């Protein structure tokens, strides 16, 4: 896919332009260890998937959004991977960093509280989220270990 979602969908605006594939044939092969989807297409036309083994993916083996004409034959999809060090929530948090920066710039000193929790500023929430994402990154990439209190 040229971008993560079709226009008007998803957590952020990936832009109005989508260069979609056409007359796609993927056949006679194995697609494994995909971080998100094995095959992902947005707005594609005339897609043929045949004689494939798709496995060890996070979200879906095959994802076609807004397609026009797809033929899928003799494909074995699954299992999904059980070795996913981070979930899609981590990706979404990273993708939204620019939006969080805007929130801090615009509303950083505003306070809010979630049900049953102490009130904090927008800046504090964003700082904590970024710190936790950095810890996850350091753990997954560099093997850093943390305690529950970190």
Image: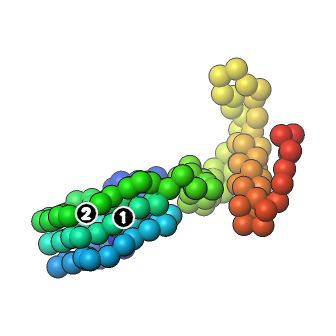
Q: Which mark sits nearer the N-terminus, 1 or 2? A: 1
Q: Is residue 61 left or right of residue 21?
A: right
Q: How many numbered discs, if any?
A: 2
Q: Residues within 10 Å of mark 2 (few under 14, many from 20)?
A: some
Distance between mark 1 and mark 2 Cα atoms: 8 Å
* Residue 87 spot, x, y in % from top left: 56, 51
Quarter of the rendering containing residue 25:
bottom left
* Residue 43 spot, x, y in % from top left: 24, 66
Q: Which residue is mark 1?
A: 54
- Looking at the image, do the residues carrying marks 1 and 2 touch, with CB atoms under 8 Å apart? yes
Is residue 94 in view? yes
Residue drawn at x 71%, y 38% as measured from the top left: 110
Q: Quadrant of the N terminus?
A: bottom left
- Indicate whether 110 appears above or below 82: above
Seen from the viewer's position, the closer of residues 12 and 87 is: 87
Q: Residues within 10 Å of mark 1 (few under 14, many from 20)?
A: many
Seen from the viewer's position, the closer of residues 75 and 67 is: 75
Secondary structure under badge 1? Answer: strand
């Amino acid at each position: 896919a040229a971008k993560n979602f079709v226009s008007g969908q998803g957590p952020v605006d990936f832009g109005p332009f989508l260069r979609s594939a056409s007359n796609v044939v993927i056949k006679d092969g194995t697609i494994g260890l995909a971080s998100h989807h094995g095959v992902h297409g947005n707005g594609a036309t005339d897609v043929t998937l045949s004689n494939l083994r798709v496995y060890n993916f996070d979200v879906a083996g095959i994802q076609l959004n807004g397609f026009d004409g797809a033929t899928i034959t003799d494909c074995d999809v699954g299992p999904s991977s059980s070795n996913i060090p981070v979930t899609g929530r981590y990706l979404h948090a990273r993708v939204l960093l620019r939006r969080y920066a805007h929130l801090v710039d615009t509303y950083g000193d505003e306070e809010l509280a979630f049900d049953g929790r102490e009130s904090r500023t927008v800046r504090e929430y964003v700082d904590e989220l970024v710190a936790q994402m950095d810890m996850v990154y350091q753990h997954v990439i560099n093997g850093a270990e943390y305690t529950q209190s970190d």
